[in-house]
Amino acid sequence: MSIEDRLRALEDRAEIHQLIAEYGRVLDDRDFEAVGALYTEDAVFDTTAGRMIGRQGVIDYYRERVTPFGPTYHYPHSIELRISDARHATGIVAAHAELAIDGETVWIGLRYHDTYRRDDRWRFFERQVRLLYVSKLSELPSVMAQTLRVRWPGTEPQRAALGPDVSERG
């Protein structure tokens, strides 16, 4: 691998890390147009509420989903990247989010399974949300030990998408 190729790979990794960090900030700032700009025009966003298709679908989803919430804070942690070529990459981002829903603090542990594509910049082409847990902060210590760890306020508990007690789906 040439020095130029190695430098390009490092620059690509840095740009994808920036994309991932920017996602949380603009989402928490409720800048839905900026969130949309992080996705390709033909993006696919596989959420807990179903698949959103296209950049506008992503914008519409977030506008509807998070507007009723109070403050939200999304934090990426570890990032695994595999760059295939100059225009394609995949990754898994371990993350957590803190949400204010109906006066309660809710914590979410999740992984994003991402496909990135580069046009004028790196963007999300496909993003799949896989939940490890969802819990009111006050209940988190006991929820973590349960099989039914996905506990959105006002809904019945559900199985997590990932974890040692769950076979990974997708």
Image (cartoon, rainbow, N blue to C red):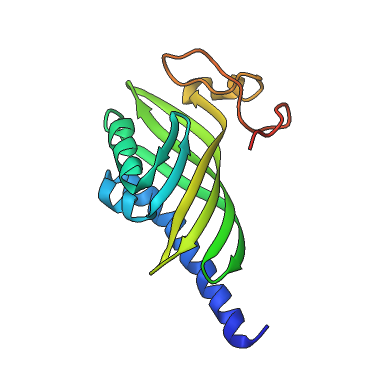
Residue drawn where x is 54% and y is 63% of the image: 88
Where on the picture, by quarter, is residue 167?
top right
Q: Quadrant of the C terminus?
A: top right
Q: Residue furthest bottom?
A: 3
**Against 92, is 8 above or below?**
below
Q: Is residue 87 visible?
A: yes
Q: Is residue 31 visible?
A: no
Between residues 142 and 168, which one lies in front from this camera angle? 168
Residue drawn where x is 61% and y is 80% of the image: 6
144 relative position to 134: left or right: right
Between residues 126 and 147, which one lies in front from this camera angle? 126
What is the number of callouts on the image? 0
**Against 42, is 166 above or below?**
above
Residue 118 % position (x, y): 46, 65
Where on the picture, by quarter, is residue 18?
bottom left
153 relative position to 103: left or right: right
Residue drawn where x is 50% and y is 68% of the image: 14
Residue 66 % position (x, y): 32, 33
Residue 164 % position (x, y): 73, 31
Q: Quadrant of the N terminus?
A: bottom right
Between residues 5 and 151, which one lies in front from this camera angle? 5
**Against 158, is 4 above or below?**
below
Residue 142 % position (x, y): 60, 19
